[in-house]
Image (tube, rainbow, N blue to C red):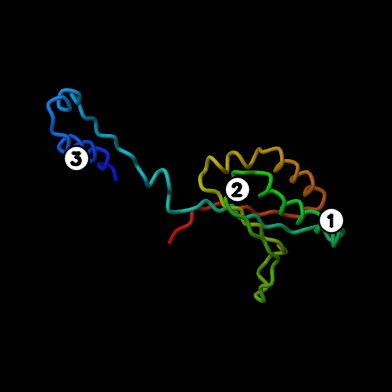
Amino acid sequence: MKHSIFFLLALLFCACGTDSTAEAITEVKTISVDVAAAAPDSLLRHAVMFSFKEESYPDGVAMVEAAFRELPEKIDAIHDFEWGTNNSPEGLDKGFTHLFFVTFKSEADREVYLPHPDHQAFVEVLGPHLADVLVLDYWTRD
């Protein structure tokens, strides 16, 4: 892909073959485009786990769930979103009951998301109900 533009220009030059074309093209520059940088093959995952205060069940927790689910419609930087509640039989959840999975295409998108006014408004809704939080971000790998 990097040299396809140079190839197309050279092909055009040869196909035309007239002296006026040769005079018009005095310098051919190679334009290099790094396609991998423009479209990385991995995604940035933002995994957020919550445990809630006992007094927040069920209404406060439902309010937090609804507020988080609205963020993808409000923040364009979010590429994908999913969430769920723990149902592991292993008993290793350490009190965390909810997992929200926010996917970004780039770190720049995450940088838009974190201070975004709608994300900050969600944090305000969450605050009174939150017992603990764990956040891990990672790039996906095959």
Quadrant housing the C terminus: bottom left
Q: Nearer the viewer, residue 131 or 76?
A: 76
Q: Nearer the viewer, mark 3 or mark 2?
A: 3
CA neighbours of label 3 inside 10 A, class few (<14), some (14 to 19), many (20+): few
Q: Would residue 58 be found to the left or right of residue 15 on screen?
A: right
Q: Residue at x 72, y 64 (%)?
A: 97
Give amino acid for label 2. Answer: Ile
Q: Is residue 20 above or below residue 75?
A: above
Tell me, for residue 25, which label it has, or none.
none
Q: Residue at x 65, y 44 (%)?
A: 75
Residue 67 locus on image (x, y percent): 76, 51
Residue 14 locus on image (x, y percent): 15, 37
Count of marks placed on residues: 3
Q: Nearer the viewer, mark 1 or mark 2?
A: 2
> What SS does tag 1 mark?
helix
> What SS does tag 3 mark?
helix
Tell me the residue that label 3 is attached to.
11
Q: Nearer the viewer, mark 1 or mark 3?
A: 3
Q: CA distance from mark 3 to mark 2?
A: 42 Å
Give amino acid for label 1. Answer: Gly
> What SS does tag 2 mark?
loop
Say if mark 1 contacts mark 3, CB within 8 Å: no
Q: CA distance from mark 1 to mark 2?
A: 24 Å
Q: Residue at x 71, y 61 (%)?
A: 98
Tell me the residue that label 1 is attached to.
60
Residue 140 locus on image (x, y percent): 48, 56
CA neighbours of label 1 inside 10 A, class few (<14), some (14 to 19), many (20+): some
Tell me the residue that label 2 is attached to.
78
Residue 55 locus on image (x, y percent): 87, 59
Give amino acid for label 3. Answer: Leu
Res. 111 image quadrant: top right
